[in-house]
Structure formats: structure tokens, C-alpha cells
Amino acid sequence: MRSDINMTAKIDPSLEEQLTKFARSRQTGVWNHLDKQQVISDIRDRLNNPYQIQQGEQPFCGPAAVVFELIRKQPDRYIDICQNLYEQGSFDGYTKKIVAAGRLCRSYGNLRMPQVDWMLLATLRDCANKVLPVHPKAPKVVRELGGITKPWEISGWVRELLGYSQAKSHPTPLAGEFRALQEADSSIKAGGVAFALINSQGLLGTNSFLASRFHRIYPNHWVAISGNISILGPSGYANEPSTKITKNKQSRVNFDIYSWGRKIHVNTDTATIKDFFWGVTIGK
């Protein structure tokens, strides 16, 4: 057995039973260059800590954010999806079947990310692409352009993977930054999900895969908002009039997100939000 596989992680017994059935299944996998034991180990790690899902060096931030919430909210479904995708090359969404292209299952090379994340995220990204196919050996510019996620694709994954009947985007040029954050807060508190489209360099101080090609104010990254949203006016209290909040530099905005395999707490001023926060897509 591979020595680098974590067999000691503790998860819910029912989930462990699902993983054991997957491990014992005699069904041959359709992904020629993936290691079954490693895939199962990767799944176990993510069930233990959903923040371990990792897009690596691939531009898969959109599907990564949605799968992060899938693991948090429906871990048993996450296992089923991964097993079906590994063994059959497809899985059932809530309204349609998601099928990995045969060329994707046969592809090999430097994945630039963990195996289970590649299998699921690449499938979601490839199925959404109409022109540029996903392949680990594709030139960088092709991978970058093919990895761009649109709001309606997030909405589609929210419905197909998570099963939320209501999926709606709130672009900030129309809804306003603070209205969008309030919609996200309302959705999360009601048991739903929220995904933010941001400029990662401006909001998080990090370089994204598109940073060298677009001005730093343009949106280039999707994150999952995991909670703790607060918009504090200059007096330090929430729910002050939006005009008072936006015009005062002492106003603060806080929220937690998942991004790039870790939890990040955003604590910034309202001017930064107005420049680098481009909207949310919610599901409930």
C-alpha cells in the first residue's frame, strides 16, 4: 500500500462505510491515469477538512468553490459523485447527467493539482466549455481562457450538484456591493450558499492566473463565502444607512471565504469592496 496515503483520518462512520464500499468495488475505473487508492485518500482528506480541496495551478476556482460547499453540506453525495465519476465516467445531477468526455478520462500529464480534484473539477469545467476543451497538456493561455467561469455556470452547478432550486446572480454594478453581501448573508443564514466574484489581487492581495492579462480592477476569481458577514458603519455598528457606510473610510466589511485550499478572513474598508467585489451568486 502507498505510504503517503492517510488512513488515520477520522470521519463519520457512515461516510467511512461508503468509502470502504468504494475501495472494495471491483469496477474498473475509466480514468486511465488516476490511482484509485490515492483518489479515495484524497476524498477522505476533504471529508475531514473541506478546505483541502485545491485547484492547484489550474484555473478551476469556480467549480472548486461549488464543490467545497458540496463537501460541507452533502458529504455522502460527494462520495457517490466521485465513485460514479471514477467508475463510470459520469454522475447524476439533480436534473441531468454529467458526463466526462472520453478524451478527458484518457488524458494524462502534469495535473498541477490533486487527483480527485482534477477528476471532478476538470469534468465540470470541460462540460461547461463549448470551444476550448480541458487538457493538462494544453498551452497555458488555452488553459486560462478555458477556465473562465461565468455566473450562469455557477448557477447551473448550484442546481445540479447542490440541488438548490433557486440560484440567482447579483452583479454589483446593478445590485450594489452591500446589497449583494446582504443577499449572501441572508442565503447563508437560511441554509443556502453564496459565491463571490472578485478581483483577487485587489481584495486579497494575491496574483490570479489572469492578473498579467487584465487590469487589476477586473473580476478574475470565484470564492465561496462561508459566513461571518458584517458591514460596520463608522460608529462600529451594523445596519447603518448604506450612504453613510459607503462615504466613510472608517466603515469596515468582514466575511470568511474559501479560496485556494484555505480559509481566509476578509477585513477591509468599503472603498476596497466597491473596487474589487463584483457580485454574488446565491443558492437556496
Image (cartoon, rainbow, N blue to C red):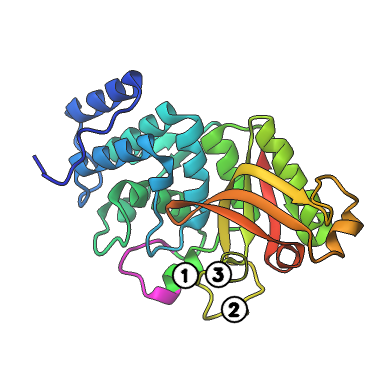
Residue 14: x %, y % from top left: 34, 19
Q: Amino acid at mark 3?
A: Gly
Q: Amino acid at mark 1?
A: Glu
Residue 255: x %, y % from top left: 64, 49
Q: Residue 88, located in which quarter of the rendered image?
A: top left
Residue 242: x %, y % from top left: 88, 54
Q: CA distance from mark 2 to mark 3?
A: 15 Å
Nearer the observer, 60 or 93: 60
33 shown above or below 70: below
The N terminus - image quarter: top left
Q: Are marks 2 and 1 in contact (CB under 8 Å)?
A: no
Q: CA distance from mark 1 to mark 3?
A: 20 Å
Q: CA distance from mark 2 to mark 1?
A: 12 Å
Nearer the observer, 30 or 270: 270
Q: Which mark is residue 144?
A: 1
Q: Which residue is mark 3?
A: 205
Magenta residues (range): 133-141
